Amino acid sequence: MFNSRLISLIRKEFIQILRDPRTLVLILVIPIMQLFLLGYAATTDVRNVSLVVYDQDRSPQSRQLLDAYQAADYFQIAYTVDSERALRELIDTGQARVAMIIPPDYSQRLQRESAAQVAFILDGTDPTVASTALSAAQLIGQQYATQILAERLERRGQVGAIQAPVEVRTQVWYNPDLVSAYFMIPGVIGMILFALTSILTATAVVRERERGTIEQLIVTPIRSWELVLGKILPYALLAFTLGVKYLPLFRTSKTASDSATAGLHKTS
């Protein structure tokens, strides 16, 4: 009967899989390694960009500005230099991706309530990192400037004057932390399992030829499509089982955003 022939062939294939250590390694170990490499190592997230600081003011106001940038997980103060030459060397050698230059009159301008300018230099060799760092630097700077303006108006008793005529409140659904792994891993799982199923099925047919058992399959009362289906179904079932089993392992717990990041993605 058709059912008995197909079930016998599937049972035989499962027995061969369990007896072959190399096949077990391909099924159990390789997909996990590929998921980690493609899902987490090859990520598009821009976090903890190395920042070199040339603080010529060295005042409490300049340290507050640096704390505002360091509070967000976009930048990490990796170097503090005392000259523009040392800053340029760190950028040229790739040890730092962005640089900040605080002028010596930064705190004096803030105390006089005049415009204080800060230089922000980016390494544009990687446009993805540079564009994200540029947007984050501008947003953090605008947020910090708004905070300073609000403090000035509060001292004058004009708190209501800071109210903007238009306020845009953004809300991110399904992936509020904007982690690329949440988007990449499900697709990578499907891609890996699809390729793994086809490769292992082809390998199983070739293995029958190498072991000299292909002639035994030819003389058995099975049809060609039954042979192909009997070779595909075991690996398809294993792929489905592995997908259901290992997908919960890659669910990362959502962490609460810090105050600076929450300011970038303001929710209603």
Image (cartoon, rainbow, N blue to C red):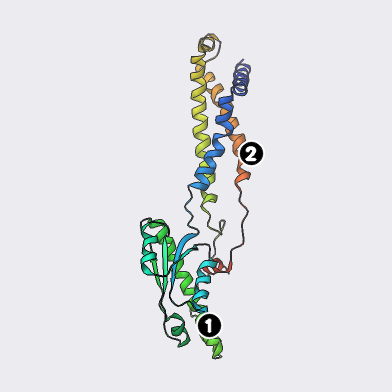
- Circle nearer the N terminus (2, 1): 1
The residue that label 2 is drawn on is: 245
User: Along the horizontal axis of the image, is 249 left or right of 232?
Assistant: right
Distance between mark 2 and mark 1 Cα atoms: 52 Å
What is the x, y in percent for residue 53? 45, 68
What residue is shown at x 38% (from left), y 55% (from top)?
126
Question: Which element type, helix, strand or loop, lies under badge 2?
Answer: helix
From the viewer's perspective, is the residue at label 2 or at label 1 nearer? Answer: 1
Q: Residue 150: which disc?
A: 1
Q: Quadrant of residue 82?
A: bottom left
What is the x, y in percent for residue 248? 63, 44
Check disc 2: other Cα within 10 Å, few if <14, some if 14-19, many if 20+: few
Q: Is residue 146 above or below residue 204?
A: below
User: Along the horizontal axis of the image, is 119 left or right of 248?
Assistant: left
What is the x, y in percent for residue 60? 52, 78
For the C terminus, the quadrant is bottom right
Amino acid identity at mark 2: Lys
Q: Look at the image and tell me whether residue 266 can be seen.
A: no
